[in-house]
Image (cartoon, helix red, strand yellow):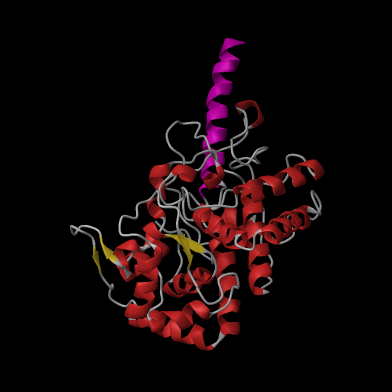
């Protein structure tokens, strides 16, 4: 009996290693994402998510921008695995959700929870939180921009969330090179980056994300400035809104697109040449020649941008996904399942290769 047990343990270990190796194959993960993934197991899943998003949007149109951003922030850290939703990290330490790039600005968690509750009532233990986030972003894009696209699903939820890994998120102070490198690390091109930046046409930002463009806070007393590439009149408006002593705790916000703040359109690209890109990183798109050419193209053709935006969202939604027996299907989006409910789950390391549109692994 003891000998048999000793033989079984290595076999089990080998099986776990094989399963982990399969989880690390990006081509395998990508192949398991497909449109209509829940057609048989939970045919009303997408409709239930859509209803939850629509109800939230009816109460607050700004929630759509929050849900789009939530998907982006999920995918850029550890891949599209719902890790941004976790309030507790089983391994200890601060989670992504509480990290500076996400707290207090990231929102939409309550909408995801409402959608998850509705889906669980209909199809228990079936639909992942990561997929719900992807569906909710798509529905938000539809509501604000009348853009429709299908979402390949089959993502599984991760069991790790580390605040330290939010360094993968591009800050508003990013240079053109920073942006290019951070997106390239996720197998997203310069064009993908410029296309996805167009999401800044909806939503709001806290003063702390751009106050350094209108106030020199290191001076005594703080001095009014106009950052390079910023319209003086726009800078004056922002300075009137945001006090010179602005900190992360300052609750004041402003629309990123003052013209059409709740409409997903190409107005963002039209504002950039006028010096009305809110963030330093926005202005970088007009400074870099390659990016500036794309900005001009999308400013002139909204239909083209929307087509590319939908495609880029699908591509982003494939970043480092967990599928099959990798990860888990969380019962509660904010906490991992009890160990007894997740005994077959396998967690990808944070260094797992990213996945591009053609499922080619990169280092």
State the residue in front, 193 or 295. 295
Residue 256, x across and y down, in percent? 48, 69
State the residue in front, 96 or 349. 96
State the residue in front, 31 or 8. 31
- Could one spot residue 171 in this view of the protein? no
User: Which residue appears at 55% of the width and 71% of the height?
Assistant: 261
Residue 216, x across and y down, in percent? 24, 63
Q: Does the magenta run of residues contain 150?
A: no
Residues shaded magenta: 1-24
Residue 211, x across and y down, in percent? 34, 62
Residue 272 versus residue 239 in the image, above or below: below
Residue 33, x across and y down, in percent? 64, 57
**Magenta segment main secondary structure:** helix
Rendered image quadrant of residue 58: bottom right
Which part of the image, by quadrant, shows the C terminus?
bottom left
Q: Residue furthest bottom?
A: 300
Rendered image quadrant of residue 144: bottom right
Q: Does the magenta run of residues contain 15?
A: yes
Which part of the image, by quadrant, shows the N terminus?
top right
Q: Residue furthest top?
A: 1
User: Which residue appears at 55% of the width and 87% of the height?
Assistant: 301
In this rendering, the count of numbered labels is: 0
Residue 137 versus residue 146 in the image, above or below: above
Q: Is residue 228 left or right of residue 166?
A: left
Q: Is residue 242 left or right of residue 59?
A: left
- Could one spot residue 246 in this view of the protein? yes
User: Which residue appears at 42% of the width and 43% of the height?
Assistant: 163
State the residue in front, 17 or 315. 315
């Amino acid at each position: 009996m003891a000998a048999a047990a000793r033989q079984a343990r290595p076999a089990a270990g080998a099986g776990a290693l094989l399963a982990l190796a399969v989880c690390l194959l990006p081509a395998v993960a990508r192949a398991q994402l497909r449109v209509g993934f829940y057609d048989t197991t939970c045919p009303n899943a997408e409709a239930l998510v859509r209803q939850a998003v629509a109800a939230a949007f009816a109460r607050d149109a700004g929630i759509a921008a929050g849900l789009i951003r939530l998907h982006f922030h999920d995918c850029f850290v550890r891949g599209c695995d719902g890790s941004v939703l976790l309030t507790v990290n089983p391994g200890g330490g601060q989670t992504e959700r509480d990290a500076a790039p996400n707290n207090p600005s990231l929102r939409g968690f309550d909408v995801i929870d409402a959608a998850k509750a509705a889906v669980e009532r209909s199809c228990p233990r079936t639909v992942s939180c990561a997929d719900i986030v992807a569906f909710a972003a798509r529905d938000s894009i539809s509501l604000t921009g009348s853009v429709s696209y299908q979402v390949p699903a089959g993502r599984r939820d991760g069991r790790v969330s580390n605040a330290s890994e939010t360094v993968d998120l591009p800050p508003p102070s990013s240079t053109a090179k920073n942006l290019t490198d951070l997106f390239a690390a996720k197998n997203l091109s310069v064009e993908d980056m410029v296309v996805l930046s167009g999401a800044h046409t909806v939503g709001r930002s806290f003063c702390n994300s751009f106050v350094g463009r209108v106030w020199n806070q290191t001076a005594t007393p703080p001095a009014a400035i106009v950052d390079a590439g910023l319209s003086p009149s726009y800078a004056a408006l922002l300075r009137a809104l945001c006090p010179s002593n602005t900190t992360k705790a300052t609750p004041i916000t402003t629309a990123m697109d003052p013209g059409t703040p709740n409409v997903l359109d190409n107005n963002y690209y039209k504002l950039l040449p006028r010096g009305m890109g809110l963030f330093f990183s926005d202005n970088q798109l007009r400074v870099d020649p390659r990016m500036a050419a794309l900005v001009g193209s999308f400013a002139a053709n909204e239909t083209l941008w929307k087509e590319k935006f939908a495609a880029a969202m699908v591509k982003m939604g494939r970043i480092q996904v967990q599928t099959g027996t990798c990860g888990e299907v969380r019962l509660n989006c904010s906490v991992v399942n009890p160990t007894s409910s997740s005994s077959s789950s396998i967690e990808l390391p944070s260094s797992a290769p990213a996945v591009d549109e053609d499922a080619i692994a990169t280092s």
